[in-house]
Amino acid sequence: MKHSFIVVLTFWCGIIFSQNDDKYEELTVKLQFKESTDNIVIPFVNATLLENQKSFVSNAEGFLEFEIETLPQDIKISVYGYQTKILKLDQNNFTDDIIEVKLDKDILGLEEVVITGTRNELSKRSSPVLVNTINSRALESTQSNTLAEGLNFSPGVRVETNCQNCGFTQVRLNGLQGSYTQILVNSRPIFTSLLGVYGLEQIPVNSIQNIEIVRGGGSALYGSNAIAGTVNVITKDPVLNTWDISSTVGIIDSEALNTRLDFNSSVVSDDLKSGVRFYGNYRKRESYDANNDGFTELVELESNSIGANAYLKPNDLSRLSVNLNSIHEYRRGGDRLELAPQFTDITEELDHSTFIGGINYDLNSIDQTKTLDAYASVSRTNRDSYYGGLGGKRTPQDSISANNAFGNTKDLALNIGLKLTKSFSQDADLTLGAEYNLNDTRDDIEGYNRIIDQQVSNIAIYTQYKLRFAEKFTSLIGARFDYIDVNGLYQVEEVSRTADLDQTAISPRLSLAYDLNDNQKIRAGYARGFRAPQAFNEDLHISSVGGEQLFVILSEDLETEYSDALTLSYNLNLNKNLAQYDVLVEGFYTSLQDPFIQVSTGAVLPNCSILEEVRNGSGAEVFGVNLEFNYSPDPKFLFQSGLTFQQTAYNEPQVLFEPDNSDLDKVVVNSFVRNPDVYGFFNFSFMPNKHWQIDASTTYTGSMIVPRVINEDGFIELNQSQDFVDLNLRASVDFEVNESFKINLFGGVKNLFNSYQDDFDVGPTRDSDYIYGPAMPRRLFLGVKFGQF
Amino acid sequence: MKKIITYCFILFCVFSFKAQSDKSIHWQSFNKLASIQKHNPRPIFIYIYADWCVYCKKMERVSFKNKVNIDLLNNKYYSLKFNLETEDTIIFNGITYKNQEFTKHRQPKHNLAKFLSGKQNQISLPTIVILDKNYNATRRLHTYLSPKQLNLLLEAS
């Protein structure tokens, strides 16, 4: 018995020991991290094995112990504040004892980081493409309620209101119309044609951290619709837990009340790995009648918007974020707003409901030379509309038409993309990306038999290579290849058009930057762009003129529009003790071939509506100079200004009105309408201490040609407008009640000189598009904000 | 016997009050540091911040409000802090430090910050420096520390 027991025991021991022999022998690595200059230990250092990406963190004494399976091993050592090092362990230098690893200190840059110019984060000063930024402080100091208002304060940019009945705004870069500018949020296009009509006013300012504007076609990375440039609205991840509620009251010309309520809150975990930002706003504005003719110049508007951005950083190399936003807006203009629309003479009533959602994932490689960015976003808008009215007459037919003017638009936009970057060295990097966009719009007004049913799908790949090929020269070369498929039905009354085209286009771009010295830089750029025929944002908006509706339809043989843009600029940045100067002189030239032009054909539909057609015009050129001068003698004062001189010209006189009959003359123009030759802005801020801020800001709009439809056939009169100076003043003071509660009071006046259009068309037969110049007359405002912010 | 028990009880109460956590950090002043260090030497914890540093504010609201950390900072170390951009003259370890960049730079860095962080130009904040009883630096960090990381650091040094 004893024998058997011993045998069994030996047998078991044998098995156990033999198993140990089979077990792979692991090596223990012991590292002690110290600073190279003075031997101090460095806590919380990251060590990552390059072969399998396992990573470890040292303790607070800079000591780290972990197991590896084989030699040699490459270990990446990184910690904030020190230069990254690759530790190569092999048979020769490996030891069971503690291995000392010395790290050198790292110098970090504190300059403002810019994303748009090259589609990757880059310090503003070293960007080869010129980028102008408007930050959230500037939006606050100009009392900009919406993105639309804030954009006026950048050189070469103008925002204008195009319709009294609906308040449709567009942003014009370097003199070109709104549809030549691509609007992005966090570098992704989310504006569809429909959202572009009213969307500029719907993005509330409290969700914006920075706006980056790249003017002049150097942006073939974002889509071929960015001929004039891009406006990139950037939101940043929150760090602190904050909350604030604010309320503003304004009164327009002592008549119309404007109220706003905003709230914001952010919550971030203690380890900074996850966080969320919530925001919401409510806005109500009464309508305003400038000339007491019973018809509004400013629409009644009520909107609310609510959204959330959340992020998660599972580790140092990756980030996942989700954003959701819901916007609801109601607008009404015309006369007798208290009646149902079909009983008024003119009503434009719009009820928008939009939902936007997006997700994106960023990943960095361990050695920080490669990045991956994957994103998807969707936006869905439902718009109920009414464009119509009795038009000043009272026959039964008018009443039937008025009752049939209700419509509905549904718009869906989808955007999915992937972007990869690789840095070969400090001087060279490559970007590759692919994108898919889908935009499906269905606009229906049964009463006019008006249909726009359009699907646009677009697949694109793009690439860009940035190279610093000499000490002072940086170049950027890129191209985007687009495949666009447009399928559409465009119908109004008996006129019906279809579009079924597919098109490929290559849009190259080239930029060159030369450093004269540390402070001065010269940049030059060329870019090509195109626009395929499709219903753009202005077409989805219906005007009223002469008491009738004015529709826009695409001409049958509409061809693709192409553009070439050139820019050349000189930039000086100088810091002398506390003073900072910034000077920019930029020349721009854009040539358009076959530009889309809206021509009034004089055609009148059976229901008396007027028809305008989008045709290809003869070529056109826009060229000019942007000057910018910013100066801050010390942190208490800031002075910013910009002035643009430009000329626009059609190669051949452009027809705006072509009569059906020979009673009336053709109306032609040689240069773009609604484009002043001179325009600019100026901001002055004074911050005497931490609590007070006083701001004065102005925009200047020079004289321009504005067309006005003056009879039922659509005949156009060309008027020269006056020039406008729109001066705003604002004062703000902070009270810190305690460490976690602060109250901010602010107030002032916008358009102090009441520089406002004074020749509005009158009555039910007015041309509702005859509106130009500053968006609002004199307005007083007062507000309070409180919370922990 | 009863007296002894009573005294023990009173002492016990006194000690238990003392052992309760303080609600906030007792930041020492640089002027008094030399004398308290002479009488009761302890390692020194220095925290450098600035008005514009968001991560500093996060640490102040979160890591420096943690009870265990507060306890360590009050009882194991002498804890001091100063603003990177302060105009004040600070005497530390017998040497006088001023802010020589005061009218020359928008972010004027105090000489003591330069000395403690070992950097002349870009100093990233928050900066935490731990020194032993003899004023020798033993730890130096330039990042945000979560409550847990700060705790590990304070326990270890």
Image: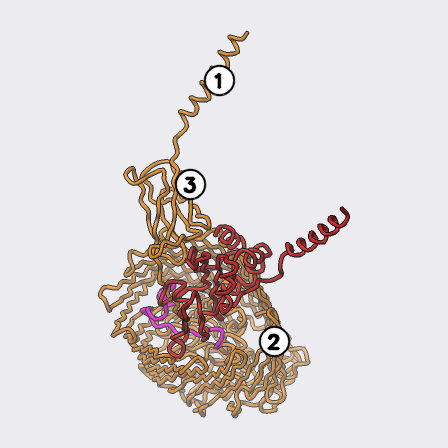
Chain colours: A orange, B red
What residue is pinned by disc 1? A12
Please provide percent x and percent y for residue A689. Answer: 51, 80
Q: Are there few (<14), some (14-19), or many (20+) residues within 10 Å of tag 1?
A: few
**In the rendered image, the vertical position of residue A487 relative to residue A39, given as above or below:** below
Q: Amino acid at mark 1?
A: Trp
The three-letter code of the residue at mark 3 reads Phe
> Is the residue at mark 1 from the same chain as the one at mark 2?
yes
Closer to the N terminus: mark 1 or mark 3?
1
> For the residues carrying marks 1 and 2, which lies nearer the camera in this image?
1
Q: Please state the chain letter of the residue tagged with numbered disc 3 in the rendered image.
A: A
Q: Nearer the viewer, residue A168 or A697?
A: A697
Q: Position of residue A30 (x, y in %)?
A: 39, 42
Magenta includes A419?
A: no
Q: Nearer the viewer, residue A84 or A705?
A: A84
Q: Which is nearer the N-term, disc 3 or disc 2?
A: 3
Residue A390 visible in the displayed image? no
Outermost residue toward the left in this view: A470
- Tell me the residue at 40%/63% (across/down): B117
The magenta span reads: A114-138
Q: Chain of mark 1?
A: A
Kind of element beneath mark 2 = strand
Labelled disc at residue A743:
2
Return the mark for residue A145.
none
Percent from the top left, x then y, of residue A440?
50, 62
Residue type at the position of mark 2: Ile
Give the CA distance from mark 3 to mark 2. Answer: 52 Å
Q: Are discs 1 and 2 less than 8 Å apart at CB?
A: no
Q: Position of residue A9 (x, y in %)?
A: 50, 15
Which residue lies under the disc numbered 3?
Answer: A66
Query: For this view, does A316 lie left or right of residue A520?
Result: right
Q: Dot 3: few (<14), some (14–19), or many (≥20) neighbours within 10 Å?
A: some
Work out whether mark 1 precedes mark 2 in sequence or the reverse, and give the earlier one.
1
